[in-house]
Amino acid sequence: MALQQLSEWFLTVFGDIKVFRFPFFLVYDPGSYQVKGDDVRALIDVLQPGDILLRAYANYLDGKFIPGKFSHAGLYCGAVHEDDRALVGTRQRSRSARDEARSALFHTGAQMVVHAMAEGVFIEDILTFSRCDQLVVLRLPRQIALRPDAAPSPIDPTLLSPEEHSLRERLASGEASPREEFTALAIGHPAGRFPQ
């Protein structure tokens, strides 16, 4: 019986070892990602375009150098279609950078997240983005207004689109605006038009 238990233990441990060829490295990882398929299915049911996703990983070296619990953020866009490709890279000054963003970093799908990493800003499926150990969803309040004592935004107004400039002016005048107006602009769909 002891030999069978030893054999089962060995197979369990052996199945949790990852091998990396270059540089050659062995890693024992019995847990894999803690966010599982059922968690992602439940997440998909509650996500809305404009939600901010924060994710964290356990035991990654770069996480030891990033302050705070969460090391990465993404913006949930919802459905992204081929028609949306024209919206990508519109603020790039270089045509080659715009073309690169539209070809290599743009992907379509039903539940997409836009986020930035060392490789650049890109769009990927929520299923791929959710491969992590912890995930939090942040949602803006239904109505957004500036506090009366809020300092003016330091953003250069020449960098804003006409829709963004209009929203900024209305906020500065004390007017409240619905969350959807902010999220539509953040995703790149002016006048509240989300891809269906």
Image (spheres, grey):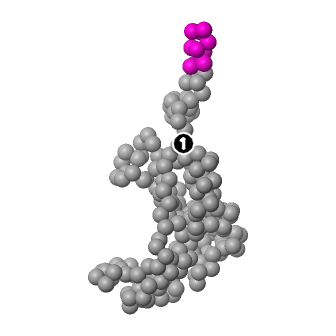
Read off the magenta span.
Answer: 1-10
- Residue 193 percent across, percent down from the top left: 62, 79
- Residue 141 percent across, percent down from the top left: 46, 73
- Residue 143 percent across, percent down from the top left: 46, 79
Above/below status of 71 relative to 195: above
**Quadrant in the rendering for residue 21:** top right
Q: Amino acid at mark 1?
A: Tyr
Above/below status of 58 relative to 139: above
Judging depth in this view, the residue of 179 and 76 nearest the camera is: 179
Q: Is residue 24 visible?
A: no
Element type at mark 1? loop
Taking the image as shown, residue 54 lies to the left or right of residue 6, namely left
**Quadrant in the rendering for residue 14:** top right
Q: Is residue 109 visible?
A: yes
Does the magenta stretch mainly form a helix, a strand or a loop?
helix
Above/below status of 133 relative to 140: above
Taking the image as shown, residue 61 lies to the left or right of residue 96, namely left
